[in-house]
Amino acid sequence: MNQLLVSVLMPCYNAEQHLQAAMMSIQNQTYQNLEIIAINDCSSDRTSELLHSMAKKDLRIKVYDNKENLKLIKTLNKGIELCNGDYIARMDSDDIALPQRIAKEVAFLQQNADHDIVRSLFLAFNSNNPDKKTLHHNPLKHEELKAYMLFKSGICHPAVMIRKRVFTE
């Protein structure tokens, strides 16, 4: 059975410190039918150089360099237009995805046609103290999530996948 294409959208700004680890965590996913849309938003460090070097070694990586600093929201909107996948997985350039993240999110969306977005639990850690991790639990029931979202976001970028048609319909 053919796997659906998943676009992993990763905006990057001055990300050289964590970029390789973040990218490797996506490259090493158990789900392999990926395109990785990496957008360098006018970084002043080696982000662009690193991205282009990684893209030469892995054809799934597509690098785009903004001509001017668009900031996060405009860069994400540009990225959505560049994504060709049936699903869009978000990833930040300083985050690490566990190896089965994409496979589990795809499986959920394929088994639940009435859902357009899936998000998972996530561990938060500080790069200054990576041994201290906090597992974040969000509400599971619709009404609880609506109340929760009055005060906090129910979506963490490196733990969310969305059907592309949500953006095009």
Image: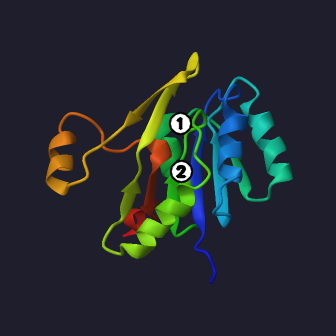
Of 61 and 111, the residue lying toward us: 111
Label 2: which secondary element? helix
Height in image: 98 above or below 133? below
Q: Earlier in the sequence, mark 2 or mark 1?
A: 1
Q: Crowding near pointer 2: few (<14 within 10 Å), some, many (20+)?
A: some
Q: Residue at x 58, y 64 (%)?
A: 6
Q: Nearer the viewer, residue 111 or 9?
A: 111
Q: Residue 100 shows which numbered tag?
A: none
Q: Position of residue 23 (x, y in %)?
A: 68, 43
Residue, far top: 128
Q: Are marks 2 and 1 in contact (CB under 8 Å)?
A: yes
Query: As displayed, is residue 43 above or below residue 28?
Result: above
Image spot of residue 81 (x, y percent) = 53, 59
**Viewport quadrant of the C terminus:** bottom left
Please name the residue shown 73% across and 53% down the image: 61
Classify 10 Å Cα crowding around label 1: few (below 14), some (14-19), many (20 and above): some
Hey, what amino acid is under mark 2? Lys
Please, what is the three-letter code of the amino acid marked with disc 1? Leu
User: In the image, is 48 to the left or to the right of 22?
Assistant: right
Q: Is residue 105 left or right of residue 144?
A: right
Q: Residue at x 30, y 73 (%)?
A: 114
- Residue 70: which numbered mark, if any? 1
- Return the residue at label 2: 78
